Image: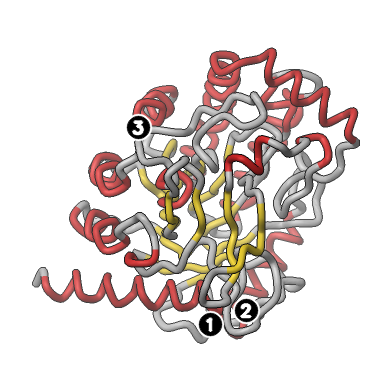
């Protein structure tokens, strides 16, 4: 397993020099953030990012993410041009040595939470999803990190209505069309495409979501049965629903060599199905991180892994879920488990 760390570029409050100091850190996971969604990433920007990362002693082999334009998901408007641009991005990233691209097919909203700074008893703060709060939110007036904030409220309403009309089967059809266009290019470039699950893995605001559970992951992988068409298996996104058994999913899809990227984090599932993000340590949440990593070890996983969302601790401020301290603790905790598994198996 290659340990990596999410990095938002030179404007990230978490300095790359600090990431380098985390033991066993092989590289960072990043992207080009100042190019409009759907457009081609200039080669010079990609190479500049690569040089910045490499000059700090780290690798840039994973991109998270190349966003999929809403026109592609809805297969309307300028979707054909955006797909061609997406193919070019795969080619450009391949030329720069990128081996894995993480992306998602979530309509309108990326990861959704009801609060970004819920304080725990120990004084740390974290992201939470309380269903009763989400039910009261107006989706046309929301803004969360990672969301496209360029839509006016009336544009957002039109977009949401379009997805409601499209429905799950329409979204599946459009995803299949997209995959059949891009996976041959990824195969040609030997780049692994790794779809991220929906977060949370159920419909929100009446909008369809489809990358949610084992049956749907099976369906997804069969749309284009190619080893370059794989998964970013996020323990927190799938694991916040008790119908998903993460170690089982790791063993199943890991044995198939269809997991290309692993996000590891812990969540505490509440009685009503709401959840709170916690420290990575198994005892802090509902997921057994040891069992998850044991499953990766058993299937001989050689892909990329990173600590996912962390709490804000020790007075740190910054991008919600993406501070340095708690994610670094998560990486070291994972390193300890991985080392123990490797040494005890010899």
- The quadrant of the rendering that contains the C terminus is bottom left
Residue highlighted by disc 2? 16
Q: Earlier in the sequence, mark 3 or mark 1?
A: 1
Q: Quadrant of residue 160?
A: top right
What is the secondary structure assignment of the residue under circle 2? helix
Q: Is residue 273 shown to the viewer in this render?
A: yes
Q: Which residue is mark 3?
A: 214
Closest to the observer: 141 or 334? 141
Q: Earlier in the sequence, mark 2 or mark 3?
A: 2
**Badge 1: residue crowd in 10 Å (few <14, some 14–19, many ≥20):** some
Quarter of the N terminus within the rendering: bottom left
Residue occupying image coordinates x 53% and y 67%: 310
Residue 136, image x and y in percent? 71, 37
* Residue 116: quadrant of the picture: bottom right
Judged left or right of residue 277, residue 282 is left
Image check: 184 left or right of 221? Answer: right
Residue nearest the viewer, comparing 282 with 68: 282
Does the residue at mark 2 contact the one at mark 1 (Cβ under 8 Å)?
Answer: yes
Judge from the rendering whether residue 11 lies leftward or rightward of residue 312; answer left or right.
right
Q: CA distance from mark 2 to mark 3?
A: 36 Å
Q: Which residue is mark 1?
A: 20
Give percent across and percent down for residue 201. 49, 37
The total number of labels drawn is 3
């Amino acid at each position: 397993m290659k340990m990596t760390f999410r990095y938002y570029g030179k404007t990230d409050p978490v300095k790359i020099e600090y990431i380098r100091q985390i033991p066993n850190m092989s590289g960072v996971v990043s992207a080009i953030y100042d190019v409009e969604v759907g457009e081609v990433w200039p080669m010079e920007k990609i190479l500049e990012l690569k040089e910045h990362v490499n000059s700090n002693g780290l690798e840039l082999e994973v991109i998270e993410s190349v966003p999929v334009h809403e026109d592609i998901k809805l297969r309307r408007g300028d979707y054909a041009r955006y797909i061609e641009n997406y193919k070019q991005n795969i080619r450009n990233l391949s030329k720069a040595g990128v081996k894995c691209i993480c992306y998602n097919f979530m309509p309108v909203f990326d990861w959704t939470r009801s609060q970004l700074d819920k304080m725990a008893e120990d004084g740390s703060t974290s992201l939470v999803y309380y269903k009763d709060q989400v039910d009261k939110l107006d989706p046309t007036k929301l803004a969360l990190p990672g969301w496209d904030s360029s839509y006016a409220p009336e544009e957002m309403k039109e977009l949401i209505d379009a997805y409601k009309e499209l429905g799950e089967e329409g979204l599946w059809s459009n995803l299949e069309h997209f995959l059949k266009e891009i996976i041959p290019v990824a195969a040609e470039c030997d780049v692994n495409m790794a779809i991220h699950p929906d977060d949370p893995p159920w419909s929100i605001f009446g909008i369809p979501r489809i990358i949610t559970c084992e049956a749907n992951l099976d369906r997804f992988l069969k749309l284009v049965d190619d080893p370059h068409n794989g998964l970013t298996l996020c323990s927190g996104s799938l694991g916040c629903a008790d119908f998903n058994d993460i170690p089982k999913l790791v063993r199943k899809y890991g044995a198939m060599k269809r997991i290309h990227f692993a996000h590891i984090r812990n969540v505490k599932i509440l009685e009503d199905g709401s959840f709170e993000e916690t420290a990575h340590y198994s005892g802090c949440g509902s997921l057994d991180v040891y069992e998850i990593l044991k499953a990766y070890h058993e299937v001989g996983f050689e892909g990329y892994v990173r600590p996912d969302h962390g709490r804000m601790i020790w007075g740190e401020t910054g991008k919600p879920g993406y501070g340095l301290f708690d994610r670094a603790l998560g990486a070291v905790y994972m390193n300890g488990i991985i080392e123990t598994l490797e040494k005890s198996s010899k």
